[in-house]
Image (spheres, rainbow, N blue to C red):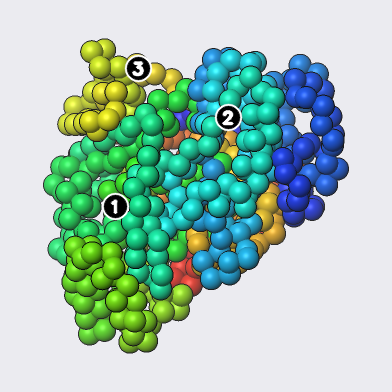
């Protein structure tokens, strides 16, 4: 089924609400379809695996048959398959011993990887990749989540090599919220492609008075890539060239978008997050969404911090160390970000949802092709390539796409995150696995399960309304839920009064998105 038409979503709730402890997270039983695996000791405590299997069976029935191959209509022998987890950070922002509510667990990755291998039938490639937050350690993330153990186990016997790949071009070291070191990384070995959505961007027509803020001190980079009819994104070619992308997001609240699931998880396919507008400087009174109100304190902070960040970016790294005491004083004067609404961390953020929707437009409609080949470039859309990219490309034609990259999303909600997501959420044991082939339908279902109003989550609300570059061919109320919880089965439009979870939103979103 075409992903735009795929309104069916599977939701499985298990009663354990916990992850298995021993990597590589073997299945709880020797399921007949897994006969291709070498002999392994079963892990009877691995209810995550059985939940993933049950979820796949709801969408692709046939688990009672020994030749069941649930991902066969998505993954074909010879494909390059990308698994894209949420690997934002190796630990909770303020509780370094906690991580399970922050990133996708390795046991979820293991289960999905088994079924991808089954569908490949010994031919193809699997790449597990992400671009974590810039001050994160990809190595630590892979180790703490158990993913490194999973990959090492596969590569000890499988004819198909599984690769772990950090898509970032740079890693930072921060102390007291000040960047004190920047290290260049190899980045994506296939390079990056820059896609300009132009007038088809959700930012077209928005020219903020004080400008956008991206993800680094140097706002000139963000402004260079977002102005007038230029709205472009730097995307990892490993992902964009893949035959199949399986999105493995974490179920969490988010300070800038309300929630983060499938749509927002594509932030991790970017090579440079400073190309991504996160908020507009200022407050609504002067066209911004950095702060909810305009006052002397807010205006002073905007002017002072903007100037300070420009100095920090241009200074030698050793100079940045000197600003750590200044940052501490700033917290005393202007307040702690964990207590004060700033940086677009509130329900009035009208920027980040646009960026997330734009990324999904790029992902689903952009089709790379080899230099010298023919491509389908839509009007008013300029496509450029980085010098280290072997590809050129264009937005896919709506009626005759040049390639058929396939997509599947499976959300890790076993232990979800509520409150100060995405980096400092409280653990919310839910025992949930949610899956489907359309990211908007997946996120609408996730928002509903969290107890939020999908019409108040901007990127789901707006994504259902897109006409020129649509992400769905159906409405929110048409999302069709299959579940092992019978009370959750049916059309989403008919389930609004059914009891689900009640997630605590980020404090900047309280009272703004909860379902009444």
Residue 332, quarter of picture: bottom left
Residue at image point 45% right, 50% down: 132
Which mark is first along the chain, 1 or 3?
1
The correct choice, above or below, for 162 with respect to 249 in the image is: above
**Relative to the observer, which residue lies in front, 374 or 258?**
374
Position of the C terminus by quadrant: bottom right
Residue 273: tell me if it is visible. Answer: yes
Mark 3 closeness class: few <14, some 14–19, many ≥20 residues within 10 Å:
many
Q: Secondary structure at mark 3?
A: loop
Residue 375: percent from the left, percent from the top? 26, 17
Q: Can the viewer see residue 365 in this picture?
A: no
- Reply above or below: 312 against 387: below
CA gap between label 3 and label 2 equals 27 Å
In primary-sequence order, the first of circles 2 and 1 is 2
Distance between mark 3 and mark 1 Cα atoms: 30 Å
Q: Secondary structure at mark 2?
A: strand
What numbered label is drawn on residue 274?
1
Looking at the rendered structure, which numbered label has been put on residue 328?
none
Would you name the residue on which mark 2 appears?
162
Which residue in the protein does label 3 denote?
A: 402
From the viewer's side, name the closer residue of 164 and 336: 164
Q: Is residue 270 left or right of residue 66?
A: left
């Amino acid at each position: 089924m075409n992903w735009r038409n795929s309104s069916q979503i599977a939701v499985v709730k298990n009663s354990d609400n916990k992850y298995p402890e021993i990597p590589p997270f073997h299945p709880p039983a020797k399921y007949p379809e897994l006969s291709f695996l070498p002999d392994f000791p079963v892990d009877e405590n691995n209810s995550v695996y059985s939940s993933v299997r049950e979820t796949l069976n709801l969408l692709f029935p046939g688990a009672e048959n020994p030749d069941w191959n649930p991902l066969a209509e998505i993954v074909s022998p010879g494909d390059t398959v990308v698994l894209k987890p949420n690997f934002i950070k190796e630990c909770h922002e303020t509780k370094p011993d906690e991580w399970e509510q922050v990133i996708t667990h390795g046991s979820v990755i293991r289960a999905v990887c088994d079924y991808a291998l089954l569908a490949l039938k010994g031919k193809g490639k699997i790449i597990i990749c992400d671009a974590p937050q810039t001050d994160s350690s990809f190595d630590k993330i892979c180790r703490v989540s158990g993913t490194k153990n999973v990959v090492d186990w596969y590569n000890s016997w499988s004819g198909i090599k599984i690769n772990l790949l950090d898509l970032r071009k740079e890693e930072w070291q921060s102390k007291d919220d000040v960047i004190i070191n920047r290290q260049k990384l190899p980045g994506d070995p296939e390079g990056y492609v820059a896609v300009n959505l132009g007038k088809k961007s959700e930012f077209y027509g928005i020219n903020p008075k004080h400008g956008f803020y991206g993800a680094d001190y140097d706002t000139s980079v963000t402004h260079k890539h977002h102005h007038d009819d230029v709205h472009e994104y730097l995307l990892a070619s490993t992902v964009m060239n893949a035959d199949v992308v399986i999105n493995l997001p974490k179920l969490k609240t988010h300070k800038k978008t309300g929630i983060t699931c499938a749509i927002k998880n594509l932030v991790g396919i970017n090579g440079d997050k400073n190309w991504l507008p996160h908020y507009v400087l200022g407050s609504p009174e002067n066209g911004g969404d950095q702060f909810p109100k305009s006052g002397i304190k807010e205006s002073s902070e905007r002017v002072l911090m903007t100037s300070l960040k420009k100095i920090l970016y241009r200074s030698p790294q050793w100079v940045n160390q000197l600003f750590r005491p200044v940052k501490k004083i700033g917290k005393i004067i202007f307040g702690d970000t964990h207590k004060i609404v700033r940086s677009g961390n509130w329900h009035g953020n009208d920027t980040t949802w646009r960026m997330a929707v734009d990324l999904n437009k790029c992902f689903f409609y952009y089709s790379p092709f080899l230099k010298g080949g023919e491509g389908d470039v839509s009007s008013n859309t300029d496509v450029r390539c980085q010098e280290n990219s072997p590809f050129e490309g264009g937005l896919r034609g709506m009626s005759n796409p040049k390639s058929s990259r396939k997509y599947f999303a499976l959300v890790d909600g076993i232990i979800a995150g509520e409150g100060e997501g995405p980096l400092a959420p409280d653990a919310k044991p839910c025992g949930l696995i949610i899956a489907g082939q359309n990211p908007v339908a997946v996120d609408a279902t996730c928002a509903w399960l969290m107890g939020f109003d999908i019409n108040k989550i901007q990127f789901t609300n707006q994504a259902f309304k897109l006409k020129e570059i649509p992400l769905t061919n159906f409405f929110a109320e048409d999302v069709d839920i299959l579940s092992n919880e019978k009370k959750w089965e049916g059309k989403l439009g008919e389930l609004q009064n059914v009891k689900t979870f009640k997630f605590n939103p980020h404090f900047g979103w309280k009272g703004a998105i909860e379902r009444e």
